Image: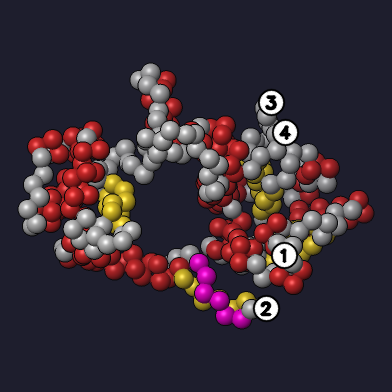
């Protein structure tokens, strides 16, 4: 979350304890600030270290409270209270400050004190079961993408910005209770409705989409060559069908409408694969960019990717090419 705010102009100062450094730093002291994961996750931030001893707490309150617009905290429940930086005390120091507390289960309720991280938060909201292929015979192993962490960061940054806008009108700060479980569950609304309203148990979809067909990776000509195709509208389908028709493939009547294509995903995937197997991935891509409108869209996306590959100068390693964000400055 702080990195998102940092990339859009905020000055972010990260407080880190000397007793136990960030795990992404690794164990080699020579690579303390040089590990790729650490540089990626903490880019753009200033960092200072503290022992967090009792004598330092008043000074920490002053720095965090009096001189900050926002305090982002993701410790276990009770740590901030011990430091005297929980909301009742913090708002006395600075009534305009915004405190956002990032927790797996939030700050209230029977599970508030549970210690969590991305993968085990997913268990509580249902994504572990759904993160699988439709024909899988075994349960999903732990996904290495900590999805709740990423969604919590983006949603939390949005909440902070919304509160900053409101503060201009009210002059007052606010405490934001950000629960990753609730944020993640909000993305599964259709699955919950499927179970509670339609009385059907949701099942894993793999790489398929509920609203697009064909959709997903398809094998192409060559050794382990693949492409990704996504067709959302009837207009896109007509162009795709015309491209496949040039080599003699004729779409069946059961693929005539968007709803029919979604309902017959498996048969449609086989039909699409029979076409992609005759082409190199780049040939498939060129078939999809024949129109002038699609070429313009493709060019915009290419510029977007180039804009995100920013060249930055690292204090210790010199010039580096790393991920960045698109910014528009008026």
Q: Magenta segment range? A: 318-323
Note whether residue 204 is visible: yes
Residue on which the image places disc 3? 110
Q: Earlier in the sequence, mark 2 or mark 1?
A: 1
Cα–Cα span, label 1 and label 3: 34 Å
Q: Residue at x 31, y 57 (%)?
A: 226
Q: Earlier in the sequence, mark 2 or mark 3?
A: 3
Residue 31 vs residue 116, the one in the foreground: 31
Q: Which mark is residue 16?
A: none
Cα–Cα span, label 1 and label 4: 28 Å
Residue 205, given in percent of the width and then of the height, sits at: 37, 37
- In which quadrant of the rendered view does residue 45 lie? bottom right
Q: Nearer the viewer, mark 2 or mark 3?
A: 2
Q: Residue at x 58, y 42 (%)?
A: 119
83 lies above or below 49 = above
Cα–Cα span, label 4 and label 3: 8 Å
* Residue at disc 4, secondary structure: loop
Q: Nearer the viewer, mark 2 or mark 1?
A: 2
Residue on which the image places disc 4? 113
Residue on which the image places disc 1? 47
Which quadrant: the C terminus? bottom left
Q: Earlier in the sequence, mark 1 or mark 4?
A: 1
Please say if the residues under marks 4 and 3 sit with CB atoms less than 8 Å apart.
Answer: no
Q: Earlier in the sequence, mark 4 or mark 2?
A: 4
* Residue at disc 1, secondary structure: strand
272 lies above or below 190 = below
Q: Residue furthest front?
A: 223
């Amino acid at each position: 979350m702080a990195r998102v705010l940092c990339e859009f102009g905020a000055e972010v100062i990260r407080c880190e304890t000397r007793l136990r450094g960030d795990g992404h730093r690794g164990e080699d002291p020579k690579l303390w600030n040089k590990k790729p994961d650490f540089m990626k996750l903490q880019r753009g931030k200033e960092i200072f270290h503290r022992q967090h001893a009792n004598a330092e707490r008043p000074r920490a309150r002053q720095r965090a409270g009096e001189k900050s617009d926002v305090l982002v905290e993701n410790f276990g429940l009770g740590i901030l209270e011990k430091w005297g930086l929980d909301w009742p005390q913090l708002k006395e120091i600075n009534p305009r400050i915004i405190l956002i507390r990032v927790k797996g289960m939030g700050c209230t309720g029977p599970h508030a004190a549970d210690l969590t991280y991305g993968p085990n938060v997913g268990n509580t909201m249902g994504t572990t079961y759904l993160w699988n292929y439709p024909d899988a015979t075994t349960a999903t192993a732990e996904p290495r993408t900590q999805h709740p962490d990423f969604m919590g960061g983006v949603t939390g940054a949005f909440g902070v910005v919304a509160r900053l806008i409101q503060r201009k009108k009210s002059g007052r700060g606010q405490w934001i209770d950000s629960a990753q479980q609730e944020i993640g569950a909000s993305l599964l609304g259709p699955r919950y409705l499927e179970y509670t309203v339609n009385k059907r148990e949701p099942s894993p979809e793999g790489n398929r989409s509920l609203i697009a067909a064909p959709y997903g990776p398809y094998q192409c000509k060559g050794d382990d060559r693949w492409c990704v195709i996504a067709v959302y509208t009837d207009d896109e389908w007509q162009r795709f069908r015309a491209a496949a028709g040039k080599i003699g493939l004729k779409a069946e009547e059961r693929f005539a409408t968007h709803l029919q294509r979604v309902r017959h995903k498996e048969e449609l995937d086989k039909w699409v694969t029979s076409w992609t197997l005759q082409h190199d991935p780049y040939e498939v891509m060129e078939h999809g960019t024949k129109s002038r409108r699609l070429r313009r869209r493709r060019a915009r996306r290419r510029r977007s990717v180039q804009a995100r590959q920013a060249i930055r100068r690292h204090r210790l390693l010199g010039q580096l090419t790393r991920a960045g964000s698109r910014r528009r400055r008026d």
